[in-house]
Image (cartoon, grey):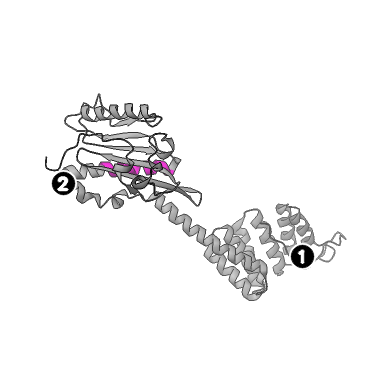
Amino acid sequence: MTEAVEAKSGAASPSEGGGGTGVNISLKDKGNEFFKAGNYLKAAALYTQAIKLDPSNPTLYSNRAAAFLQLVRLNKALADAETTIALNPQWEKGYFRKGCILEAMEQYDDASAAFQTALQYNPQSSEVSRKIKRISQLMKDKKRAQEVEKKRLNIDMAKHLDTLKSEMSAQYGSEECWKEVFSFLVETIETAVKSWHESSKVDPRVYFLLDREKTQTDKYAPTVNIDKAFESPETHSSCFSFLRQYAEDSFSRAACLVTPKSIISYPQVWRGQGSRKWKYGQHDGFFVQFESPSLRKLWFIPSSNEMGQTLCREPEVLDISAHEVLPRLFKEKLLNA
């Protein structure tokens, strides 16, 4: 926002300063005209000339600070604001200029302090009061943006899935086995969340935890694309049959399906009634369905836009019997069977 420059007289006119041209308009007034016309570079140059003639005039430094601010020469602008304050410590304009420049630097705490000082010297200033309210909101927005960015960068699905450890331990027995499966699930979800944060999308895929000893890795890949799986009941059934056979033939120990909600035409598991009623509103997001012979789990990870950034919310645990995206991929293996 263009801040008004001071229109009071202060710099000597050329005719008064020695070596004048006889023009009655002062250098400062000429600078003000260029400032109002948006020619901030010329305005700053004229204020500089005026300062050479009248180096103790705080108005000139204040005006040049405003011009430098518009030119985004923030360090020079701040230096002029500080000089304005030094020359006239009880003039609110110097603190106001300083606050505006610190705002542009996104140093909101210091900007707020400068505006508060300006208000002390001119309690009736509605302009300063508006600035204080604006800075307060900017400080809140900056804090929230930092929190959002922290959440986007610090993805810790292991923490969200911590309660699953005991269940896996009971189902898989071997600590080495369940920890490997747990790590596979965590890594898959974290990769999906990172992709969503970067591009607001995930590729519909099924990730398989292959058996290191039995799987023919030249024949079976750990990832299968399923982008056509949810177009119709027919494609859904065909994809399920393929994946179930793939899981068996590849000797997979577990699988994890990831698919965005937006591509699912069938089955629209969020349109059920009664026990199948969807509880998570119209949020965009993606499903994660974990499959193994002894354990099945389903999550929906909703997404929102926070401070212009895409942010995944905490995973919502779904009843897989009510909302499964695909039927069971592995033949059921009962506990201790």
**Looking at the picture, how far across and down is residue 65, in whole percent?**
66, 61
Q: Is residue 127 left or right of residue 249?
A: right
Tell me if residue 189 is in the magenta stretch.
Answer: yes
**Looking at the picture, how far across and down is residue 28, in whole percent?**
77, 62
**Which residues are drawn in magenta?**
184-197
Instruction: Please give the name of the residue rendered at 70% of the width and 52% of the height, measured from the top-left corner.
Output: 41
Q: Is residue 81 left or right of residue 317?
A: right
Front residue (pair 238, 151): 238
Provide the residue designation for mark 2: 175
Q: Is residue 300 left or right of residue 107?
A: left
The crowd level at tag 2 (other Cα within 10 Å; few <14, some 14-19, many 20+) is few
Front residue (pair 1, 235): 235
The crowd level at tag 1 (other Cα within 10 Å; few <14, some 14-19, many 20+) is some
Q: Secondary structure at mark 1?
A: loop
**Residue 282 sits above or below residue 229 on the image:** below
Question: Which comes sooner in the sequence, label 2 or label 1?
Answer: 1
Q: Is residue 79 left or right of residue 267?
A: right
Instruction: Please give the name of the residue rendered at 64% of the width and 70% of the height, measured from the top-left corner.
Output: 85
**Looking at the picture, how far across and down is residue 280, in whole percent?**
40, 49
Name the quadrant containing residue 19: bottom right
Q: Secondary structure at mark 2?
A: helix
Q: In the current view of this chain or complex, which residue is farthest to the right?
A: 22
Q: In the current view of this chain or complex, which residue is farthest to the top?
A: 219
The type of residue carrying mark 1 is Ala
Can I make out residue 55 in this image? no
Provide the residue designation for mark 1: 7
